[in-house]
Amino acid sequence: MRTAVKQHPPRYAVPLRKIRELGKACLVTLRPYCYVAPSLLVFALFFLYPIGYLVYLSFTSWNLLNPAKEWVGFANYRELLQDAEFAQVLANTLFYTVMSVSLSMLLGLLIALWVNRRGWLHSFVQGAVFSPYIISLVSVSLLWMWMMDPQYGLLNALLQMVGLPPSPWLAHTDSAIWGLILVSVWKVVGYNTLICVAGLQSIPKELYEAAALDKTPAWRRFASITLPLLSPTLFFLLVVNMIASFQVFDTVKIMTQGGPVNSTNMLVYFIYEYGFDFFKIGYAAAAGVVLLIFVGLLTAVQFLLLAKRVHYR
């Protein structure tokens, strides 16, 4: 009598199925990270690594010619805190940032309120105001250098036509930084106007129609409807303009080179001078770290103080 041999499934069948399920689960989990990995790699290579290397250089003494970098600890930061020139540069940068950002945003808002209407004149003004923004900053700086020339400049000619005394503009310590602020406002106000116009056009017309039926005054409509609903746009412009103002370099390099008597020297130009003119890379890197911390802190303060006042629909 023959005995039937019972067939048992292979012992590895269940573990293999579990391994496959585990592999699929891991693949599903890791798939999003694989998608963003190239972007993260580029971010780490071109953003995180330069910042880390900048911080490392700020603790060294290096003249850019000798490959050896001497570790000096916080000596560069202590020297920065005791440097009167750095204090003046910091004050110049803050003054330039506050004045150029506030004036460009105020003018941009006023022009946007006027050009936000139908008609060829408003469209023409909108395009004309925006055109300086697309011109190279080097060309803009050279143009304004000629216009601010004390002897042959256009601005002094216009002042004399209306009976006002000529101004030394970039040649005097009191007026030179105002010349840079004027150039910055002239270039940026078109961009601010365009963004504000886009924000104004996104406000529902029904709100203005309801206010008109209630015979609400114009200033009340602006304070109760326009300004609150435009606050996200204004907040965006404030952060972007402030960061751009802290990075001003081209106009300083071309128009004044930090003079006269260091009255227009800004933080980025100070870093450039000490890094590539005086070959004090460690000292310049320490100033760069201070700039990074300063911009980061101001941006964080803006988000903490103003973000709660911004009305998002």
Image (cartoon, grey):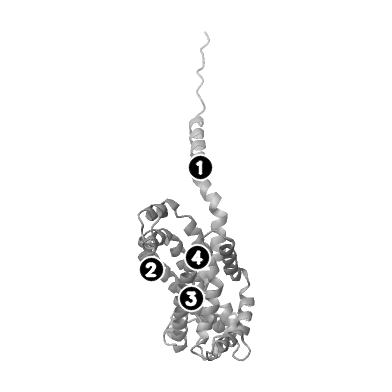
Q: State whether residue 248 appears in this view.
A: no
Answer whether labels 4 and 3 touch (C-beta < 8 Å). no
The one of 184 and 259 positioned closer to us in this rendering: 184
Of circles 1 and 2, the one toward us is: 2
What secondary structure is found at the residue carrying circle 1?
helix
1 or 3: tag closer to the N-terminus: 1
Q: Amino acid at mark 1?
A: Val
The nearer-to-camera label among 1 and 3 is 3
Earlier in the chain: of badge 1 and badge 2, it is 1
The tag earlier along the polypeptide, 2 or 4, is: 4
The residue that mark 1 highlights is 28
Tag shown at residue 100: 3
Question: Residue at horizontal 41%, vertical 53%?
Answer: 209
Q: Position of residue 107 (x, y in %)?
A: 48, 71
Looking at the rendered image, the disc whose residue lies closer to the viewer, 4 or 3, is 4
Residue 170 in which image quadrant: bottom right
The numbered mark at residue 114 is 4
Residue ID for mark 2: 301
**Disc 2: CA contacts within 10 A as few (<14), some (14-19) or many (>=20):** few
Q: CA distance from mark 4 to mark 1?
A: 54 Å
Compare residues 278 and 116 and report the one nearer the observer. 116
Residue 272 in percent (x, y) is at: 56, 80
Q: Rate crowding at label 1 as few (under 14), some (14 to 19) or many (20 or more) other CA atoms within 10 Å.
A: few
Q: Which mark is residue 277?
A: none
Marks 4/3: CA–CA distance: 21 Å
Between marks 2 and 4, how big is the CA–CA gap?
A: 32 Å
Earlier along the polypeptide chain: callout 4 or callout 1? 1
Real-space Cα distance between discs 1 and 2? 39 Å
Q: Does label 2 or label 3 sit earlier along the sequence?
A: 3
